Image (cartoon, helix red, strand yellow):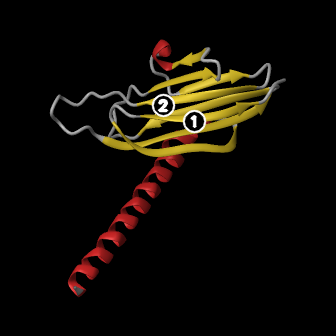
Amino acid sequence: MKNLLFTFIVFIFMSVNGATNSSAQCSDFADSIVLPLLDDYIVSGRYAQQVVSEGQSVEVRRTLSKGIRYRFAAKGDQNLPQDIEITVETDDQKQLYASKDHNFSPIWDFECKETVQVVIFVSVPNVSPLGERPKAGCVSLLSGIKPLK
């Protein structure tokens, strides 16, 4: 019985420790690779980072305020395919941006003329051969702002 309890405690510790390590790895990736893409924009403090597998998407909802210029930067780490797709839609499903129409650029700049609710989809394509386990890695979405002049 003690062995079973000990094994369970070790399993829980390793699970929590693994989640912490992957979270730290995603933070390091976001800080070193994605953050510089914001260039001279002020970091808005709004970000999303998540470990995903090929074929999965991350969905983020944001309110964009009138009179502000936004930059969104999204990238996947070296474990994932590089053609990550970013799609931005309004709540009524009007498409504002699709990275596939812009050579899969990891950056989207937007000048907000009126306050709007958007949904940002960051999708990782599934490029692993059939029967092979999909690759997993960090995806980070950061945003920056500056006032319109």
Image-based side of 110 in relation to 1, left or right: right
In what element is the residue under mark 1?
strand
The residue positioned 32% from the left and 34% from the top of the image is: 54
Q: x, y (%) of residue 119?
A: 60, 28
Q: Is residue 100 above or below residue 117?
A: above
Residue furthest to the left in view is: 131
Residue at mark 2: 122
Tag 2: residue type? Val
Image-based side of 54 in relation to 64, left or right: left
Q: x, y (%) of residue 44?
A: 70, 42
The residue positioned 17% from the left and 36% from the top of the image is: 132
The residue positioned 36% from the left and 44% from the top of the image is: 137
Q: x, y (%) of residue 43?
A: 68, 42
Q: Nearer the viewer, residue 19 or 140?
A: 19
For residue 80, which quarter of the picture?
top left
Q: Are marks 2 and 1 in contact (CB under 8 Å)?
A: yes
Tag 1: residue type? Val
Q: x, y (%) of residue 41?
A: 69, 35
Residue at mark 1: 60
In what element is the residue under mark 2?
strand
